[in-house]
Image (cartoon, coloured by chain):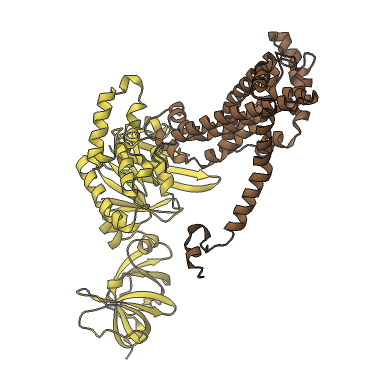
Amino acid sequence: MSTAPLLRRPFLRRQALPGRGLALGVTLMWLGGFILIPLAALALRPWEKGLPAIWEVLTEPRVLAGFRLSFGASALAALIAAPLGLLLAWVITRYRFPGRRSLDALIDLPFALPTAVAGLAMTAIFANNGWVGSLLEGWFGWKIAFTPAGVVVALVFVSLPFIARTVEPVLRDLPREAEEAAATLGATRLQTIRRVVLPALLPALITGFGLGFARAVGEYGSVIFIAGNMPMVSEILPLLIVVKLEQFDYAGAAAIGLAMLLAAFLILLALNLLQHGLRRGRP
Amino acid sequence: MSVRIAGVSRRFSGQAALDDVSLEVATGEFAALLGPSGSGKTTLLRVLAGLDFPDDGRIEIAGTDMARVPARERQVGVVFQHYALFRHMSVAENVAFGLKVRPRARRPDSAEINRRVRELLELVQIPELAARFPDQCSGGQRQRIALARALAIEPRLLLLDEPFAALDAVVRKEVRRWVRGLHDRLGITTILVTHDQEEALELADRVAVLERGRLAQFAAPATLLAEPATAFVAGFIGEACAIPARILHGRLDSPIPGLSTPAGWHDGAVRLFLRPHELLAEAGDGPALVRMIHPSLGAATRVVLELDGHTLEATVPPGAAVPERGGRAAIRASGAIAFAEDGMRARLVAGNLPAHASAP
């Protein structure tokens, strides 16, 4: 038999630059072994007890409160971190000042630090006898540690680098000429930023927001110390999963996990579509 | 509006990008700033646009000193080298930008803005592109969009920063003529920045030649070619070969025979600049080696010669024998411009053969 018909199939055609087979193989193995199989296990686990049991777990008042806190605080944290991260990226890309490199390196610290360490440190600072916590309580009567506000503070900390690092390369590539053109056309600095700079950064900002939000939803280590973990008030979903596991309720834990996964996926998909819609006119 | 640049200097960390530059551009004139990269032409454009501020000197637009006024208050239109269009806005939105950002009291209503945008797009002959985005347009179209956007603010002065550099050769020539035609129709004072002398000489009424931050000469193209003020201008504008020579015992001692000695010059080194039509070559037993021949129809044949390690372009006068490639050629000069080391300049003419050539 001739091999000609085989070679004509586009997938098996000889490539001028070899390596596709190997690259594709490793990618698929990694995707399958580390992501799809565990996810499939997670998706299958809850059904052991049937749909009513899942429904029962997910509608527990404590779990519902956890959903509200986890997704609400994460969204709020990403919303707070977005302008902060943008400003941070702006400062390190646009200005030259002593200590710029150190600041640049500091941004990545939350990636490297075990978040539990950060959580402990923040708890110490924001507790009502800590440096910042005592001042805030003394001046404004605000309590941060052991309240939902503490959860938001911890989540801002973990989501900030995602936003700063997503916006930074786009900001670096943004041609200064566009801003100069706006100035010669009579725009004030504020008009230039609002009409020229921000629209150009918005897609990156939304992507960064999505990444920061996703990271915040899954965050565990830093939050459990500062949150105080009071049922119905400051319990996040990852904590509830751990609680269920400790009670050997694996199906219940998996049910919460699956619901989180689904919700996060839908939110990220929506952000992606929004981001895509903003890129009008681009090839 | 007229523009007067007086004693403008700009230094970047000790390095002078502009060094005491003064020039005046008349109302409605088309001027060009020409120079190699690093000559300060772009710095001068940015200083004129208000995107940079001079350390010293005055920038007068219509008689008012604008040296400290920021860009947005100058009403100076700029077409940037890479056009700097706003990629997230449609072509019409790009053109409307300068009108939309005006303070409310001076802002036309939206119907008026739309009418003006349509007018401007018709002026630059791309009305059909209004709804497109810059990334969907060709280089030539983008340049027209940038021009329409700059014209929307009714500029008192129009600055073009290497506006043709990003276009391919065929489009460039056509767009160049179109831009000059548009200038003649609108009468807006225009300053073009370019490193391409052909472009500057073809487009501009007067060309300012910049050399390392200093103004070497500001004159009409024909004057630059016929009477270059400095050796730099003579070598930079038009085709010319530079030949080192000297004055010895009151006579010109040059590797190329046939030139008069400048009157009243002292002994010392001089540099001769010869245009190809001023250097005549002919087949024969001469000092020059023939490297290349450009055959031509109608015009005289041009040859590339080598003489004492210098490459020269010469012309074979009509009727003379065309030398062969690789063969030898006799040469003589029919004219040249000479610069002495102290900056003295003289136009040399044919005749008065130097001593060694006139010896029997």
- State the image quarter where residue A186 is shown: top left
Image colour assigned to chain A:
brown
**How far across and how far down the image is residue B87, in percent?**
41, 38
Quadrant of image for the N terminus of chain B: top left
As drawn, B63 above or below B82: above
Is B142 in front, or is B6? B142
Left of A273 or right of it: where is A24?
right
As drawn, B295 above or below B130: below
Q: Residue at x 40, y 29 (%)?
A: A187
The reply to whether residue B216 is visible in this rendering is yes
Is B23 in front, or is B86? B86
**How far across and how far down the image is residue B183, in percent?**
24, 44
Task: Please count the marks in the image.
Answer: 0
**How far across and how far down the image is residue B293, in percent?**
32, 79
Is B78 in front, or is B237? B78
**How far across and how far down the image is residue B212, in percent?**
45, 53
As drawn, B140 above or below A150: below
Q: Tell me the yellow chain.
A: B
- State the image quarter where residue B313 is shown: bottom left
Q: Residue at x 56, y 31 (%)?
A: A268
Quadrant of image for the C terminus of chain B: bottom left
Is B11 in front, or is B41? B41
- State the image quarter where residue A147 is shown: top right
Residue at the bottom extreme? B360
The reply to whether residue B255 is visible in this rendering is no
